[in-house]
Amino acid sequence: MRVSLSSWYKSGSPFVWLNAGAVAISLVMVIGLIALIAVRGLGHFWPGSLMEADYRLPGQPERVILGEVVETEKVPTLRLESAGVPVVEAEFMQRDLIKIGNRDLTGGDFVWVLDDFLQDRRYPDALVTVERREWGNFYGRLKAVYEDEQLVASGEQAWPVLQERIERALDIHDQIYQIEKHQIGAINSSMERLRLRERRYQLNGTYTAASEAEIASERAELDAAYRVLEAELSELYVRFNRDHMVGVASDGSEVRISLGNVVRAFRPNAMGLLQKIGFYFAKLWEFVSDDPREANTEGGIFPAIFGTVMMVILMSIIVTPFGVVAAVYLREYASQGPITRAIRIAVNNLAGVPSIVYGVFGLGFFVYFLGSNIDQLFFPEALPAPTFGTPGLMWAAITLALLTLPVVIVATEEGLSRIPSAVREGSLALGATKAETLWRVVLPMASPAMMTGLILAVARAAGEVAPLMLVGVVKLAPSLPLDGNYPFLHLDQKFMHLGFHIYDVGFQSPNVEAARPLVYATALLLVVVIAVLNLSAVAIRNHLREKYKALEV
């Protein structure tokens, strides 16, 4: 049976197809974006082969290029010619971006070369990649390994010796990290608390001879413990810097590298597929579990992951009760007059305020006004150094709670409005008070809507960067906001955040080529963290929905 165009239009089918098409396009774009981020970011951890080739531009002396080819592109020949680069007769020429490392020798990690002038490409198994804590990667050949100034091994025999001594240096590095980060950190924290206690006694006029002797005794114990650790550290550093290797770069120059400065050394051209897969997952684990190195362009991003999750959890704890209480008052107790309508309009408008405005408000009100007064009232002994009168984790969480509060209020009020009045009237008719009806019947039935609001709040808060740059986020945080030192959770401490890490690495790093894959990898990780947080909230919401399904009418 034929259907006329007007009848088909009136049936609403065009709108159904239009909506379905829009959803399909959105899904394709989201999946494509995530796939692009994943390919560009995750490929960074694969051990690329090292290429050695002769590079000779017309009219210039030949030189040896050694490194990883990380990118190729075709550029117009006219563009290269206008830049003064020798060209061949062609419309386009291919050029390769090669990571040559050896920044301490060449001043840069990357170089662009024209593919037509690369000759005699070779991939010897003997080429070595050495990851260093400073100066980036070293690419070249291993010549010898030394213990102090005594030769231990050279030539091919040096490779197993090098691996063994790197493992030894890494073990010592872990011991040094444990002492410096945790044991000495705990002593420093105790010393600071002792100093503040002494200062508090002095301000209160209670600094007696007995309290002075008590503090002196505790300080002497801490000093003694510090001296023991200091001596242990000195011994470890001597052992740590004992060994070194000598490598030969592509230009024939010899480089001496302390093994204490080496993270790992490997021969990518000699690795099999299984070895490369194992190496890939080891690098991936390092990325999510280790601290950053080289101004965030190497190493891991664990402090940023920890800071993001911690800030979102604190934000959720703050925003949920405030949002629910406000929604309950507006829906259940407030008289529905013009004032209530004006409040609802104001709440809806707050959701559209740019996030940087919340950041400026948080900096001015929470940090400068509220934080300064808290310091005056509760931490006078620490002044003039601020405790809460400076950006920190608590102010960041509160600022984002304020930013996401309208979302929770609107979602909760929407859930409360869907509960039939007959349910409330039935509860009241059975003798329950209004508070009991609200607590035992209404709120449980509205809990899935509350969780929906929380999910939306988490999604927005985890991705916000602009307000956090004003109220607590830093490029590098010396320690995590949660540790083993009293009071364990340091709400006044600055923290790292994945979103700010992307901005910092992508736009503030002096080494753009090295930072680019890390931007993709960190962006993918931020998406994963937000998805995990959202899925956790969705699971809780589904559980609550099933639990209170019997109450639904």
Image (tube, grey):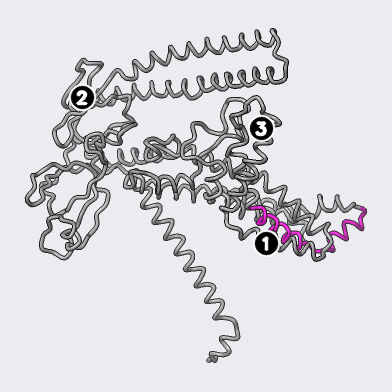
| Mark number displayed over residue 158 | 2
Numbered disc in front, either 3 or 2: 3
Residue at position x 53%, y 33% in the image: 480
Name the residue at 85% across, 63% down: 422
Mark 1 is on which residue type? Answer: Asn
The image shows residue 91 at horizontal and vertical percentages of 16, 65
Mark positioned earlier in the residue sequence (2 or 1): 2
* Disc 1, SS: helix
- SS assignment for the magenta stretch, majority: helix
Residue 124 point in image, percent of width and height? 16, 39
Q: Check disc 1: other Cα within 10 Å, few if <14, some if 14-19, many if 20+.
A: some
Name the residue carrying label 3. 375
Viewer-proximal residue, 546 or 341? 341
Question: For the residues marked 2 and 1, what is the alpha-carbon distance in whole angstroms?
Answer: 69 Å
Q: Which residue is mark 1?
A: 348
**Segment tinted magenta in the rendering:** 404-431
| Distance of label 3 from label 2 (alpha carbons) | 59 Å
